[in-house]
Image (cartoon, helix red, strand yellow):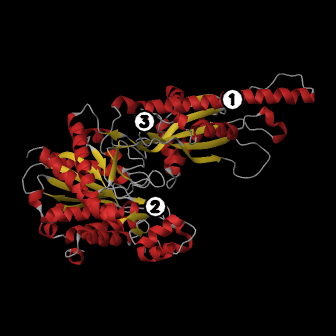
Amino acid sequence: MYEAIKDLPAEEQIEKIARDLVSVKSVNGTDGEVNMADQVEMILRSFPYFAQNPDQVWTQPLSDDTLGRKNVFALLEGAFENKKTIIYHGHMDTVGIDDFGSLESHALDPDYLQRYFSKYTKDSDVQQDAASGDWLFGRGMLDMKSGDAVHLSNLLYYSEHRNQLKGNLLVMFNPVEENDHVGVMEATKELIRLKKERGLDYLLAINGDFNSPLYKGDPRRYVYTGSAGKLLGCFYIRGRETHVGETLSGIDPTLIASKINDALNNNMACAEQIPDEVILPPSCLFLRDKKAFYNVQTAGTTHLYFNYFLYERTPKEVLEQLKAVAQDACDDLALFLKKQYTVFAKNCGLEGPAPEWSTDVLSYEEFVSEFKAKGVPVDELTNQVMQANPNEDSRQISFKVIEALEALSGDKRPKVIVFFAPPYCPHNYLREDVAAEKRCDQILDHVLRQAEQETGEQFAKKRFFPYLADSSYLAMSETAEETAAIIGNFPVWDKMYNVPLDQIRKLNIPVLDMGVYGKRAHTWMERVYKPYSYGVLPKLIRSMTEQIFEDLDV
């Protein structure tokens, strides 16, 4: 790769690398992620510095990964021989390409897509962008192979200008970002190893993940000083089945699910209230009843889960809110059924007592505590469920564990069990009361003001990267006490899933997202804006890098 880009201007160099990376199909959950890691490693080893120092590039296989995926690292030591280190990082996987439909075979061909969209009259915005020649299309071009290309280009630049680097650069590229973030979680072990064995002192981590306009015509380029967290809030809803000829005597779990969905889904009243930040409400990602086929019996159980962003709120507060919403839904349903039954009974001339419609609401930890108190081997049962379903999704395993506990106990009472399932992303941000983080924030302000004067771009600084990112696993704001309050509510924690909480707290690296700019990530119209992404951004990242090192007076 080096021979193909060494004489190109910087912007063309980055575009060449981005095109090369996009040409490798690296859909999450496929062996394409391995091919992508091999390609990134090949590019790194082609740089003269790393050709001369081959041990400064290495890979870290993911533990027990059936696909053989791996993290890719490279360490560039500056000319000043100190341990101060800045991390550049990005992910290598993409979402799938099914959404391209008839264009699926061209999903990795920027030139074909540019020609296609320049004639696409059904969306004037994408047509204008394609016709301008300033945008590059293709799966992963925005999220986030252009960001990876910027990091590689900046690394190459500093490898040829080491006198400008008053510290070290560690770059890492991770797989498995688009769902469970396994790559970066494994990488925390390697970062701690480097910290111990080489004495690296991590000052800052810069993610190159993308930013987009927040509204039509938004002129600003966003830089984020932290990462939103995420919990997957889940509801196992057990109703009381009945024949449709006696429907009012039952408790329909789909009605409870509907009320919970109505209360939470895209409801800003359930979101955190933080002025001038991109704060998103919960959103439903799964809603199914468990009937396997048609009959005239109402559903017995319903499964439901939500994406739930964390900004300043603690995980424990989320659990309490989810339980409160479930309790309100059950109480509302009981009141509704009572009213309907009164009308029904009067119409039919019934005189007997009305049915009971109360439904218990429990956290998973509360649900299993009575089993554990009786000596029921909950952990052993969980392992049995996992072994019986080796290829099952971790979220579905969680539901199956609850079903197995119900079957073992014969507990068929109407109830809602609130729990969490993977993934869990901690949240972080630069804190005013931590001197090093406050100073980083001040330096960023200076860098952005300087860039505005030099480039004419309008920058806006936000605390929380609004999309889920690997940066969540390099620092965390949650205390050990706060996370302990929810671990017991993950049925598969420490069995098929965990988050290296202690390692993240040991690292606690300030994080920034200084990403490429584009539109429509995760859609077939995904595209990156070249003038900013390949022209302005690389210099912005270098300015931040150099001023962080300069501030230390090393």
Residue 217 visible in the displayed image: yes
Amino acid type at circle 2 is Val
Give the residue pinned by disc 2.
Answer: 95
In the image: residue 19, left or right of residue 285 = left
Q: Earlier in the sequence, mark 2 or mark 1?
A: 2
- Identify which residue is drawn at 57% across, 34% down: 417
In the current view of this chain or complex, which residue is farthest to the right? 349
Which residue is under mark 1? 332
Query: In the rendered view, does 34 fall on the left or right side of 439?
Result: right
Considering only vertical position in the picture, is 449 above or below 155? Answer: above
Badge 3 marks a residue whose secondary structure is: loop
Point out the image quarter for the N terminus. bottom left
Residue under circle 3? 275
Which residue is at the front of the view, 34 or 42?
42
Look at 34% across and 40% down and name the residue there: 428
Q: Name the side, left or right, on which 78 lies relative to 491.
A: left
- Give whichever of discs 2 and 3 has the lower sequence position: 2
What amino acid is found at the position of numbered circle 3 in the picture?
Answer: Pro
Give residue 436's position: percent from left, percent from top.
Answer: 20, 38
